[in-house]
Structure formats: C-alpha cells, structure tokens
Image (cartoon, rainbow, N blue to C red):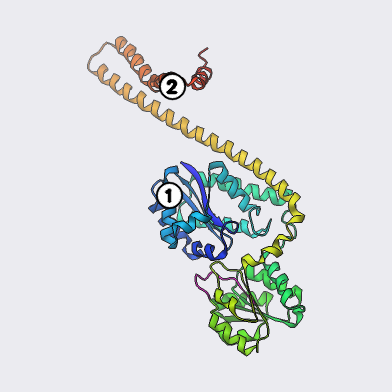
Amino acid sequence: MALLAIGISFRTADVSVREKFAFPETDIAPVLKELTNSVQGLTESIILSTCNRTEIYCSIEKTARENLVHWLLRNRQGQLDDFNAVNYTYWDLEAARHMMRVTSGLDSQVLGEPQITGQVKDAYDSSRRAETLGPELNLLARHTFHAAKQVRSRTHIGRNPVSVASAAVTTAHQIFSDLATTSALLVGAGETIELVARHLRRAGVRRIAIANRSLKNANSLAAKVADHSMHLSEIGDVLHEYDVVISSTGSPEPVIAKKTVQQARRHRRYRPLFMVDIAVPRDIDPEVATLKDVYLYTIDDLTAVIEANVEGRKESAEQAEEIIVEAVEKYAREQGARTGRELIELFRGSANSVRDAELKKAIERLDSGSDPGELISRLAHDLTNKLIHSPTLTIRNAASDDRKEILDYIRKSLELD
C-alpha cells in the first residue's frame, strides 16, 4: 500500500472551480464511508475540504488512483478535463511532506495562518468517526501535528499574520475612507465571521449585525461581537441598511441572490455597497459583480492584500521548512520500522506454520510406530528444507538476474563470509 495525497487548492484553481469540488462539512462522514467502500484497493482515507482546498489523503494501491479520481468526479459531478487541469498528486514521503506543510500553514493563502491546523484536526476527527483511519494515517497524523506544533513554537511564522478576515476589512477601507460611518452585515456564525467582527470593531464600524440559518448561533455570536442578530430569511428586508456585507457560511448554494442585491441597491439610492464572499462554495451570486455601485470580492480577490504581508515572514518560513524536513525524516524512519515489524511478524508466522505442519506429521508417524531416532532426523531434514526454500529461491533468482547488490546484502546480513 502507498500513501497518496491528491487534490486542488487556491494555487491551482480559482474559486469557481474549487467550489465544484468542495464537500459540505455535514457530508464528510458518510462520504468517507462511501469512498472507502467504493474504491477497491483503498483502505484508509481523510478528506480535507476548506475554502482554499479540497484534498484526499489515503492509503491505497498505486494502481487504484484512477478509480479514486473517477469516484471523486462522480460524487462531485465534475468533469475529468477540468480536474486534470488543476489537480496535484503526491505519493508516499512527498504526500507526508505536503500534509505537514498544509497543517503548519506553509501552503496557506495566508502564510502561517493558524486556522488550518484546526481544520486538519477536524478532518481527522471526521475520519475517526467514519472509521476510515488505520495505522498508516494514524502514524502520519502523529508526526504531522507534532511538526505543526514545532513550527508554531520554534518560529515566528504565525505572529501577527494577515488573515482573510483582516484582509477583508483592509479592502473595505478602499471603498469607505472612514469605516466609523458604516454599518456591517455578517452572514454566518463561524470562527471566520467572529474574526471579521472583531476586526470591524477595531476599525470603528458603528453597527454590526449577524445573520445565520441558526438563529440560536447568531444570537450567541452577536452577544460577543455584534449589536444585532437575525435569521437568513430576513436579509432581503434589511440588506439596504448595510454598507458592508461579508459572508462565510457552509451552504452548498448561494444565500444572497442577485435580485436581493438589486432591490437593496435601489433602496440605497445607489450608494456604494461593499460585499466580500469568503465562502467556498460561494454564498453570493457571482452575477452580483455586474451591478453598478456594488463591489463584490471573493476570497481569491483578497490575495494581493494578503501577499503584501508575506515578505516579512520569509525567514520564518525557511526555518519552518527545515522543521518539516526533519519531521518527514522521522516519519520515514518510524514508517520503515513499522514495515519491518510487520514483515518480521509475517516471516515468523510463516515459519511457525511450517513448524506446526511438520510437527503434526511427525507426531502422526510416531503414533503409527515409526522409529523415534529416524523420525527426529527426518523432522530436522524436512523442517530445514521448508524453512530455507524461499530464501534459496530468492538467491537463485538474484544470481540468474546478476543482482550482485542483493547477493552481497544477503551474504553480509546472514554472515555467510
């Protein structure tokens, strides 16, 4: 079995493609079970689906990769040409390195951002609940999270990073020179929206409201960071009252339609409306971008603001990459040791089976009256022949193929000089 990491990210695909392959959080556990049951040759699996990436990590036979791709396309109703144009594939130690870099924030849109570590942990928890974890991915998890912890503690890469939330607020300043005169509607009630609300407060926004499908969750978040809360169904009636709209929900479909924004635009008498859609799949109908006086940004549009902060953390990133190299080496050693233990167990089990079979034959001959001395001699002869049969065959094949390195290794390891 091999370790495989396959997926797409903000580096290879824009948001219009990523949203097609995103998995809603509520679907992950049943999807993992379906994946493991549907793809022959796949024994363990994890799905990581965020606004910036969709990736599958799995223990799989190398010949089964195409089966996995076809399953993904069927499940997400995607096209093979679209996927082939944007996907990446890593095997074994490169797959382990990729997961460690992702989890440590080295492959994030926001270099060093801390949220991704929690998202990877959530992905592992989903796999644990779906019972699609095994020894390979559990070993990888242990080394991955240790590496991420080392990156956080030994470098400054996570110190004061520009987040998607802060980038959204920075971009709002380009539309409204004084945010203290604006009001903001935040759609969703997750961690990202909470961060956005805190950044808006620090920027002096005078009024903040939270809209969410669960009014209970909206009320809970509003009590901490906002002035008002509402159900998603109320957005159409009040959208015109807000200058800034930032959305990040887990909805598979848009929650703000073009028609809704058109109506708000008329009520606003064409005063500017700034909207940021952080969600993948997108929350705001992309056609909204065609409306005059409406400034719609996606998560990809915030890249320029985010990248401006990367330069100052390059040295920390280089230190973090060195930590990842060390972590991959440790993972490889332990993986090799575990493979060796498994091989030893298989070899010992095979030898025990040969021993038990020959002993049974000897006991049967003893019971039938065979001479004990001859019986012991024959047992030793037959047992020796059976035990050395496979190693002897390996030596013969290596000699026939002129594999001198194998012959030298066998001679040295068995002390035959």
User: Regarding mark 2 in the picture, which secondary structure is present there?
Assistant: loop
Taking 67 as reference, is 314 left or right? right
Label drawn at residue 401 = 2
Viewed as shown, does residue 78 lie left or right of 322? Answer: left
Which one is in front, 393 or 12?
12
> What's the distance in space between the residues labelled 1 and 2, CA to CA?
33 Å
Viewer can see residue 23: no
x then y, percent, for residue 218: 60, 76
Can I make out residue 260 in this image?
Answer: yes
Magenta region's main secondary structure? loop
Q: Position of residue 361 (x, y in %)?
A: 28, 21
Q: Position of residue 224 (x, y in %)?
A: 68, 74
Secondary structure beneath label 1: helix
Residue drawn at point x = 54 percent, y = 66 percent: 16
The residue that appears at 72% across and 47% down in the rendered structure is 318
Region rendered in magenta: 244-254
Residue type at the position of mark 2:
Asp
Seen in the picture, residue 294 relative to 342 is either above or below; the reply is below
Q: Of marks 1 and 2, which one's residue comes earlier in the chain?
A: 1
- Residue 350, given in percent of the width and then of the height, sits at 39, 28
Vertical side of 203 occupied by 53: above or below: above
Determine if the magenta segment contains residue 252. Answer: yes
Residue matched to label 1: 66
Q: Is residue 11 left or right of residue 180?
A: left
Q: Residue at x 65, y 42 (%)?
A: 325
- Residue at (56%, 71%) from the top-left corner? 249
